Image (cartoon, rainbow, N blue to C red):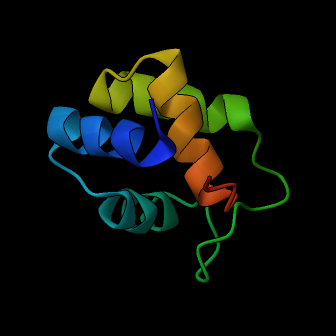
């Protein structure tokens, strides 16, 4: 599955685009105002919040983390 297909599946499951998830993460203090992961925020924290709030699995949560870290391929 391509990265874009994974993001599309996440959007279908959560009804949130990656851009909307980015805005939510900024509001929750996980990302800075520029959308970058804050230095003191670990991948695990983001993963757990996505699992809890949106019932995402590990792979989808880590795909969003990769999106946040601009590891988009």
Looking at the picture, tell me which residue is in the foreground, 58 or 48.
58
Question: Is residue 11 shown left or right of residue 45?
Answer: left
x 28%, y 45%: residue: 8
Query: In the rendered image, which quarter is residue 31 located in?
Result: bottom right
Q: Is residue 7 above or below residue 38?
A: above
x 65%, y 33%: residue: 45
Q: Residue furthest front?
A: 1
x 83%, y 52%: residue: 40
The quarter of the rendered structure image containing the N terminus is: top left
Task: Locate residue 33, reporting x and y percent.
Answer: 58, 81
Question: Is residue 7 shown left or right of residue 39?
Answer: left
Q: Residue furthest top?
A: 57
x 53%, y 22%: residue: 59
Task: Locate residue 9, reporting x and y percent.
Answer: 27, 35
Q: Is residue 9 above or below residue 41?
A: above
Task: Locate residue 51, reporting x and y percent.
Answer: 42, 23
Q: Residue furthest right?
A: 39
Question: Is residue 41 shown left or right of residue 51?
Answer: right
Q: Is residue 54 above or below residue 59?
A: below
Query: In the rendered image, which quarter is residue 24 located in?
Result: bottom left
Q: Is residue 11 visible?
A: yes
Task: Locate residue 12, reporting x and y percent.
Answer: 16, 39
Q: Is residue 63 above or below residue 23?
A: above
Q: How many marks?
A: 0
């Amino acid at each position: 599955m391509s990265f874009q297909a994974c993001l599309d599946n996440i959007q279908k499951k959560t009804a949130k685009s990656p851009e909307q998830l980015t805005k939510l993460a900024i509001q929750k203090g996980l990302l800075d105002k520029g959308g970058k992961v804050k230095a003191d925020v670990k991948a695990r924290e983001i993963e757990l919040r996505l699992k809890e709030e949106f019932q995402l699995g590990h792979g989808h949560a880590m795909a969003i983390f990769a999106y946040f870290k601009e590891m988009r391929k």
